[in-house]
Every structure is written in C-alpha cells, then in structure tokens.
Image (spheres, helix red, strand yellow):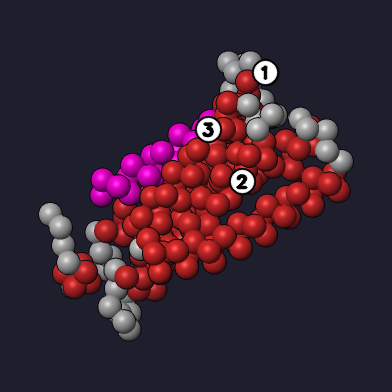
Amino acid sequence: MNLTLDEIQNFKGKYPKQIWSLFFSEMWERFCFYGMRGMLVFFMISQLNFHEKEANLQYGATQAFVYAFTFVGGLFADKILGFRKSLFWGGLLMIVGSLILAVDPHQFFFLGIAFTVVGTGFFKPNISSMVGQLYKPNDSRADAGFSLFYAGINLGALLGGYLCIAIGKGELFGSIISEGIRWNVAFGLAAIVMVISLVNFIFT
C-alpha cells in the first residue's frame, strides 16, 4: 500500500515502521563500505607492495573523495534525481565497484574503489535525509529514530570492518577458502551484502 508522506508522519508509537527498512538498508551499506575501507591499507601493502606511507596517503585520498562526493550526491538528490533514485544509483555503483574488486582486486583495484566512492557519495547522505522525512518538524520522537538508525550504522560498520578483513587475511574460514581467492571472497562479500541492502530498500 502506497502511503502519502503525511500518513507516514502521523504514525503511532515510538518509531514509524518505515524506519526499519532504512535501518537494515543502511546497516548492510555500512557493512559494504567499512568492509572495503578496512581492507584498503592492508591490501595495498601486502598485495600491491605499496610502502606504508604511500598506502596511508591513498587511504586518506579515498576518504576525502567519499566526503566530497556526498556533497555531489546531495546536490543531485535535491535538484535532479530525488532521494529514492539517488539511493538506487548509489547502491548500484557500490555493487559494481565491489564486484570489480571481487573479480580481480589486484588488477582493477583503483577502478573498483572509484565506483564504490562515487556510489557511497550518492547513498550515504540521502538515506539519512529520508529518516528525517519520516517525522514532522519538531517531532520529539525524531531523536529516538535517529538513535536507532545510527545503531544500524555502527552494527554494520562493526561486522563489515571485522569480517571482510578477517576473511582476506585468512584469519576466518582460512581452512576452507584457498589463499589465492581470499581477497576475492572478501570483496565479494561486500558486494553480496550491498545487493541485500538495495533489494531491501527497493521492495520495502
């Protein structure tokens, strides 16, 4: 059933039911992003033979571009695409980037990272804005809603930051994943959870 924004904002209780869709979409998106981010420096040093200083500079540049593209993504959402389309295309770009890394992280490392960075710029700022739209101005319940939403962010970051790098380094499932494809599997896991995030968002 399609509800108007006014009907959504007139919810009863502490949380609007739509916030759970945004909670899980953001949780899996943060899993994807922080999983990828957690692997960057270690992968560049151990697999691409970067010096530590060079790897840290590349990491810093990646994070800077992420936040630069959140500004661009916000502008596109406000002026051209709207929130839902911006989230969809951002999530799709993140999936493409993670899949590129899963196929061959050594050869296509920077290409995959570029797709992920741009996708995150379109996804990250707009889903937070959608949480705010669930509430009328000055609704005191909004603080509880954002607290719940940020719990999803932290949970996804914790899981992704640990699981992806642990698989890549062979500390997790090392006995069943051969050494030659561990990083492919780690980046592939980020792609899988991002697909879950996007499917959840589209169909709820």
Work out whether residue 171 or residue 168 is closer to the camera in this orientation and state it. 168
Q: Give the residue pinned by disc 2.
A: 114
- Image depth: mark 1 or mark 2 in front: 2
Cα separation between marks 1 and 2: 24 Å
Mark 3 is on which residue type? Leu
Secondary structure state at the residue bearing disc 3: helix
The stretch in magenta equals 188-204
Cα separation between marks 1 and 3: 17 Å
Residue 155 visible to an observer of this rendering: no
Specify few, some or many for label 3: CA neighbours under 10 Å numbering under 14, 14-19, or 20 or more.
many
Secondary structure state at the residue bearing disc 1: helix
Q: Give the residue pinned by disc 1.
A: 180
Query: Which comes before the other along the chain, label 1 or label 3?
Result: 3
Q: How would you classify the magenta stretch by its main secondary structure?
A: helix
Residue 72 visible to an observer of this rendering: yes
Work out whether residue 185 or residue 125 is closer to the camera in this orientation and state it. 125
Q: Is residue 162 above or below residue 119?
A: above
Label placed on residue 130: none
| Residue that lies at the very extreme toward the bottom in this rendered image | 138
Q: Residue at x 27, y 58 (%)?
A: 18
Q: Give the residue pinned by disc 3.
A: 99
Rendering coords of residue 130 (x, y %): 36, 65
**Left or right side of 50 for 21:** left
60 in the magenta segment: no
